[in-house]
Image (tube, rainbow, N blue to C red):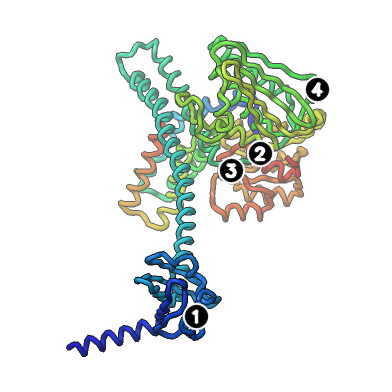
Amino acid sequence: MPELSVEAQKKVDKLKKAYLNSFPEKLNQLQLLWERTENKGYLEGDLNELAAFCHKLAGSSGSYGLLEISQAARSIEQYCHDGFSSVGLNKASIDELRALYINLVKRLVM
Amino acid sequence: MSQHIEQIAENLYALTARKMKPLVVVVDKHNNYISHHGELTDYQLPEFEVGQNCIDMLPFLVGLEDEPYVSLPIVNFNEDSISSVNVIKINFHRYVVLLEASQEHQREQQATQESNETKLLYQKLQQLTEQLEVANNAKTRFISGMSHEFRTPISSILGYSGLLVNEFSPEDDRYQFARSIESNTQYLLSLIDNVLEHAQLEADKLLTNIAPFVLNDLIINIGHMFGSYVDESGVEFKVHTSDSLPEAICSDFLRVQQVLINLIGNAFKFTEKGTVTVDFDWKNDELIVSVSDTGSGIPKEYQTSIFQAYNRYEPDTKGAGLGLTISAQIADKLKGRLELESETGIGSTFTLYVEARPANLLTIKQDVLNNKSKKILIVEDDLDLVELLKIYLNELGYSAIAVMSGNEALQYSEDEELDLVLLDMQLPDRSGVDVARKLRSQKFTAPIIAMTASSNNDDKVRALQAGCNEFLSKPIQLPPLMNAINNVLNINA
């Protein structure tokens, strides 16, 4: 198991701090995407954009060891892609997506 | 009526006679024949003449002349048949009653054998039960010990977080509360790590990574780590190194360090005043590190059991009681051993022996230098990841450049000589698959590693079909990244 040198670890820690500091901004983006998606009635284009955002967030947060956020973001991505295509758009599936969204928001805030 | 009874008696007699072949031989007190009732041939006895001495044919009568009643349950007349014999003395006559007992004997023997087998099974069962009890006791001890161990830091964490959120807590103290929470959490984590590691070792799943490393790195690390202990405890800390130590050796740096941290940590834990001394030596292709303390020592009777799991000589001590077990098991994995010498009141010395071979320092440096000349292009639009990847790649000795789009990547690979491309599969302008295909059509020959957060196997296949050589899943972590790079660059780790 390779381990980082002390200097490299310090750099990673610094990056992680910066990454954590970018959460308010990321949260803002996420909220904007969500509101647009919700207001326009869950159009495919908006859902795709939301999925892309979450895809990216899942990759980066996990790389910094924030596995819960990564998992929460990935669930949204998967639901946008697979969930709706199998269940279709209805109250239950929208509630499910909203629950996933709230879960991610919570984890980003905490 | 009486007729019936007689008939029944007769039938009963016949029944018994068929099975038990009763024979009564009447002799006088000198064992001379008087008369008999029953069949002599049933017992292979000849016809006797009255007054004939029977002792040759009924040898068991010898010495019983004066006994009023003797019962001999098993008498062997010949090889095939076994009889039960009763000798009854009435006045001057003695009645020798013979009954066939072969079947009875056989049945008895069988019963004895069966009961012997049952006894053996029972003993086995008892042994197993005892073993299980021992294991179960260890488990119970472990669970009660561990729940106590876990409880202590958790209640501290709970207590301090309560104080931390309490609006009446003075602002100045809050930092201290947070620090206490941090240190307790760290302690909890190390406890869990220990338990998990032990489970892995039990399952024989512990992996080692044998690679050349510089011994001085290890010695310096140890010095740094325990420097703070010295200030806190007032115990002196000395590190000696022998001149015979090679500069670098081939072994598992982290595992050796782990064992030493545990041994030295223990030494400080059990030493109130005096010195903790670490000696690094090299003999017969073995790294020998001994950790001595001037603590209370360990009594002889505990010296062997101290390496067993959850066994602690001092039951009140903090920890899972796994440190020495894990250390001994790691030593074993590294083809070495852990030995203990201790005397109560004087102190203990734990010595770690690790089989190793000296490594050429030049080759280690050469590896990193070789990597330095290798250039890796990162194609990734997520800035958060680009910086992290750069640190990782630099740490592995590579030089890394990053571009944020597919078009830039295509441009860059035409202008520059590259050794490797790390390619994200979701770029803003083009898909990673598209970029890989384009690169290959531009006769780009260096390896490409595809990166994506997708766990979909189809995506993996598509990337490989487009010309990527390896596939790396996000989140990005150092070990898989290193493995993937080593794989495609044919570097043997």
Dot label at residue B244: 4
Task: Tell me the residue that label 3 is attached to.
Answer: B427
Label 1 marks a residue whose chain is B
Residue type at mark 1 is: Gln
Q: Nearer the viewer, mark 1 or mark 2?
A: 1
Dot 2 falls on a residue whose secondary structure is helix
Q: Position of residue B355 (x, y in %)?
A: 74, 34
Give the CA distance from mark 1 to mark 2.
87 Å
Q: Earlier in the sequence, mark 3 or mark 2?
A: 2
Residue type at mark 4 is: Ser
- For the N terminus of chain B, the quadrant is bottom left
For disc 2, the neighbor class at 10 Å (few under 14, some 14 to 19, many from 20) is: some
Residue type at mark 2 is: Lys
Q: Position of residue B292 (x, y in %)?
A: 64, 19
Give the CA distance from mark 4 to mark 2.
25 Å
Task: Tell me the residue that label 2 is attached to.
Answer: B333
Q: Residue at x 67, y 42 (%)?
A: B483
Mark 1 in CB contact with mark 2 (< 8 angstroms) = no
Lateral position of residue A21 relative to residue A37, left or right: right
Task: Tell me the residue that label 1 is attached to.
Answer: B52
> Do discs 3 and 2 share a chain?
yes
Give the CA distance from mark 1 to mark 3.
123 Å
